[in-house]
Amino acid sequence: MSTPPVQWYPGHIAKAERKLTDQLKKVDVILEVRDARIPFATHHPNVSKWIGVKGRVLVMNRMDMISDEVRSQWFDWLKEHDVAPQFTDGQSGRGIKELAGAIKQAGIAINRRRRDRGMLPRPIRCVMIGFPNVGKSALINRLIGKRVVESARKAGVTRSLRWVRISDEVELLDAPGVLPNKLEDQTAALKLAICDDIGQAAYDHQRVGAALVDLIKDLNQEKALTNHYKINATEITGESFLEALGELKYQGNKERAANLILNDFRIGKLGSIALELPPDPLAESPPTPNSGGDGVENLGQGSEEFRDLDDLDDDLDDEES
């Protein structure tokens, strides 16, 4: 299909990213949240620059959307590259206790350094960074134990920055999703569209639906398509599969067929399908190695507190400068 490239960079993201970079000097720990189905495609190229020497935790969210086998492969591969990933599912709450423990362990290390410098301990300041719709708000709600930030499975729900008190020990900056102002890698961009991690106005649904079929076939998982739709996906292209599905269900309407396939994949009707797998052992390191904690002690649900950034500035000291 001859269609424009997948591109999406709405104004609220550009504005939020400028504010985010200004607030990062006040943050101790950065939680980078990725979509476990596409960990490489949901890595922002500026993360390493934003992290610097701060504490880091890699969060692989949507663990419910990949198989246990694939999760184990990713865990082993990342550990080989000195990364301790935290696998979570913000919808069901799986992995939240372990994530809370990882945050606490990072905070212990930070306050130990403060003590060594003759400074008093204080609550740890964290920020969740990640592409739109990777589940950051759902994770925050789970960490607090109640729904306090708006959360939905679509891109662009969070549009401004605000601080959330997770507990007496942790303050967390709730930030909108960030993504590059230009998606150079169109293979990765298609995966973002497939997983609903960018706005739906950014792409041609038929092109993306066909790309999903082709990608599933490349991963040798076409049985999921054949069994679910009763159309043999083995020897036809993604575009031809859309045509067949459109004829079968929607009087030849390929747009509705594409939307059906995309929605079925996104809500798990096709099963647990990871669109990216770990490279072979000889491949290069992941884009951003990180050191995460392995603690499992719950931070507690505490009382949440929201504060405007300007109000927070009045309370913060300038020790990081």
Image (spheres, helix red, strand yellow):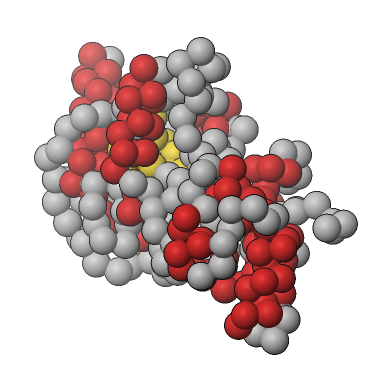
- Front residue (pair 85, 114): 85
Is residue 305 visible to the viewer in this orientation of the structure?
Answer: no
Q: Does residue 74 appear to the left or right of 159 in the view shown?
A: left
Locate residue 195, reporting x and y percent.
Answer: 54, 56
The structure residue drawn at horizontal position 24% and vertical position 67%, both measured from the top left corner, is 146
Locate residue 73, reporting x and y percent.
Answer: 35, 31
Locate residue 197, reporting x and y percent.
Answer: 56, 56
Is residue 181 visible to the viewer in this orientation of the structure?
Answer: yes
Locate residue 163, reporting x and y percent.
Answer: 40, 54
The structure residue drawn at horizontal position 38% and vertical position 48%, both measured from the top left corner, is 66
- Front residue (pair 307, 105): 105
Q: Is residue 247 above or below residue 280?
A: below
Image label count: 0
Residue 152, quarter of picture:
bottom left
- Which residue, as the protein is rendered here, is positioned at the far bottom? 251
Q: Is residue 297 above or below residue 233?
A: above
The structure residue drawn at horizontal position 38% and vertical position 24%, both measured from the top left corner, is 77
For the N terminus, the quadrant is bottom right
Q: Does residue 252 appear to the left or right of 43 in the view shown?
A: right
Q: Is residue 45 above or below residue 9?
A: above
The structure residue drawn at horizontal position 44% and vertical position 51%, both measured from the top left corner, is 273
- Front residue (pair 71, 79): 71
Residue 92, quarter of picture:
bottom left
